Amino acid sequence: MVSFTKEQIEVPKSDEVKTSSLSVLFSRLLKPGGKNVGDFIFENTTRLFAFILLSLVLLMAYEMFSKSLPSIHKFGWGFIIRTTWDPVHDEFGALPFIFGTLFSSLIGLLIALPLSVGIAIFLSELSPHWLEQPVSLLVELLAAIPSIVYGLFGIFVMTPWLRDKVEPFLGNHFGFLPLFTGPPYGFGMLAAGLILTLMILPIIASISRDVMKAIPGSMREAAFALGATKWEVIKIVLSSSKSGILGATLLGLGRAVGETMAVTMVIGNTPGISSSLFAPGYTMASVLANEFTEATSDLYASSLIEIALLLFVLTIILNAAARFIVWSVTKKYKADY
Amino acid sequence: MLNMTEETEVVDETIRIRIENLNAFFGKTQALININLNIPKNKVLAIIGPSGCGKSTFLRCLNRMHEEVGGKIKGKILLDNQNIMERDPVELRKMVGMIFQKPNPFPTMSIFDNVTAGLRLNGFRNKKKLQEIVEVNLTKAALWDEVKDILNQPGINLSGGQQQRLCIARTLAVNPEVILMDEPCSALDPISTAKIEELISGLKKNFTIVIVTHNMQQAARVSNYTAFFYMGELVEYDKTANIFTRPKMKQTEDYVTGRFG
Amino acid sequence: MIGTLYYRWRKIKSFIMSSLCFLSAILALIPLFIIFYYTMSKGLSSINWAFFTQMPKPAGETGGGMANALMGTGILISLGSIIGLPVGILAGIYLSANRTTMFARAVRFLTEVLNGIPSIVIGVVAYIIVVIPMKRFSALAGGVSLGILMIPLITRTTEEMLNLVPHSYREASLGLGIPRWKTTLFVILPAAFKGIFTGILLSIARVAGETAPLLFTALGNRFWSTQLDQPIASLTVFIYDYSKAPFDDWNRQAWAAALVLIMLVMFINILFRFVTRKRYA
């Protein structure tokens, strides 16, 4: 083994390493044992940008609120329950849009939920290992399709199908229900609801799948050991996943209420409250998309911005509730295991 | 408590680091209790003791890494009679280098860049000098012959033992005066361990080395002095031969004979 | 004997329910394939070199292309990135370095809030803070809205990828006497780079498909424009306008543009999942 003595080798001493004279200057100026200047600049820069992010969200809330003030002052809380939407006479009320948003989202949710849970069960409990990844990927690809493409699909493929096949069928056989009254346009609540189903299905399915997979295998084994059938075991897993699935549902609902393009293109864009699925409707997001550039008076614009504010608040509540539930469920299982 | 100057022969050596009344804390827990110790220059000091006795904490106080994980230090640590607590930690670590238990060459850098990392990232740019430095330090780390043709390959492609020697070369390149080693061989196979122990014997001519190890045979093989820690306190400190053949404290004797730990 | 009968019923029920679950998977994927099929069949015929390089023709004339829309989307994404990348990456670095402080928790929470805000609301905000002061619709306003949309995705990805880098590299770097900020910038960030980069690609894929916020910020433009203070065309608004039109030819072009968009988005998504999956292998 070759050995060297320090004197034989010309290597830079610790002092020579500090060739960046500026940093040497600064580190001598600072009190000894104190912080590096580079650290100070870097850490405060990152802190600044984190602060920018925070202020951005607060700024958004503030700006929307302040620009809605004219409308808030004129209509007050009544804005939420008024049904007139008359730009000509400067009379505005948000109820038709709130109704449209909630009704279409609810339809989407009602259909998407059982399907999503079914998919989640399939992926978590039933599917053979080699099938799980590809199917998961395909379900997640559904989420990646841009809204406008869903809208295109909605206009040219789905609404003709609804108008010519589905709605006449439903109207003829179940027309006694108020849900299925009225002429079948194709465009309308049902179309919007179905499109929303497709869009929120991947969210609910993938989160539910994750929640179910997080449940320890020992629970399933115990059930099997007692002689339970596959489905009975699944029921047990489901009952433990309830709150996680609820959280996923809220997230899906949050997505549905904010969905704009696909819904605008198929819902018919006529403000009105009707119990029929065949009737055209109007959502908060759609009225913003369609009328924002047309807003001729300040009050008109302000009312629209108030609608945006309502939508903003609604999605924040839904998302916060959802994240809290999902977080507390997965945390519970991480703690136990 | 032991009085160092009377009961050991460290008094004959030049002292590199003096530790006076060192107390270290993790939040409310006290990890080190009133440590007093002198580390001699250009010798190997082994720190032994059972798990949790504070040996790693002690090591990390010497280059102020303990504070990076939120620990607190009270007391004096004098490097060449200057209190390191009053020095910029970044400058200190150029003089006191550290080798870790699990080899950790930087994943995005080649072997060459790994060796020069400590210099380059502090502004050293002279390309020719850097090439010399790489060869010299890889040779010192007994790795040059194995990697001289693959200097541009990623550092993480090497075997465990080679990676650890690369980390040693990387530390040597900054030219520290003291090298701290935290169980450097515990993640390696016996052959790599032997190579590194041989390396340590060669390095001690020029560097002051402090090595934490849970392997008593290793301590006996490589070190000149050994300190036995137990539950945060320094129990005994003496020449290695004495610690293992004529320990003065019963706890030391129990530990080195394997009765506990 | 009732026991075995009941047992058989339980087994049948189990089989039925399991089949229903399998069926729901199929049912959900059918629309995916239908959408791909229709986009392909209706759009492929209109895709040719002219489509990519020509400008839109006046209403009533057949042919023409979406060159200005493609470029517009490119410009809007670039503007969005200029805003979204610095804020996202630096805030992500901050969050990764500060796990528990109140401020960091607030920032993390608000990032999630921002993530859930509908893009149309972001468009309204961009209208208020850019269009109104500038007194005109502009590419800049569109870029701002896209940038805001990109921020939460990039912040979250950056934070997660930085946290994945093993702590030992930080220790090794600090042990060499390298200051904390250089450690983060030159050792940790490069190690996390691959993941962060694909996260950036993913956020680009998301905003490339956005229509709503552009409707009243960038507005749209039938002519070639690269000016940032003027309205600008985009792929998504192109699809929207052409889908509403009564001309068959235009509708076909909408499908073709949708095909291009879907291909782009799918490609990036699959790439992202491939890269992040391999990491855990």
Image (spheres, coloured by chain):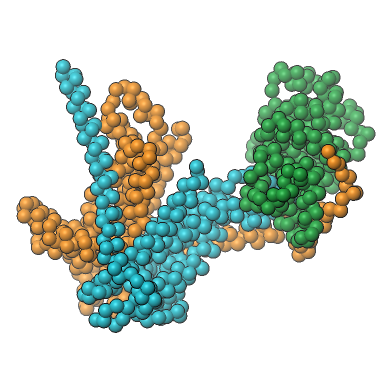
Q: Position of residue B245 (x, y in %)?
A: 83, 20
Percent from the top left, x then y, of residue A171? 8, 56
B41 or B89: nearer the viewer:
B41
State the residue in front, B224 or C149. B224
Looking at the image, which residue sits at the far front? Answer: B149
Q: Which chain does the orange colour mark? A: A
A6 relative to B162 in the view: left or right: right
Up-down relation of residue A186 to residue A126 (above or below): below
Q: Looking at the rendering, which quadrant does residue B141 occupy?
A: top right
Is residue B205 visible to us here? yes
- Position of C227 compared to A26: left or right? left
Image side of residue A62 versus residue B98, left or right: left
Q: Nearer the viewer, residue C150 or C27?
A: C27
Q: Which of B176/A248 is in front?
A: B176
Q: Is residue C94 left or right of residue A19?
A: left
- Residue at 48%, 49% in the rendered image: C276
Say above or below: C253 vs C17: below
- How many numbered callouts? 0
Answer above or below: position of C172 versus A19. above
**Residue A308 in the image, given as x and y percentages of width and height:** 33, 65
Residue at (55, 47) in percent of width and height = C164
Q: Report the chain shown in green.
A: B
User: Chain C is shown in which shade?
Assistant: cyan
> What residue is drawn where x is 17% and y is 22%?
C5
Q: Residue furthest right?
A: B12
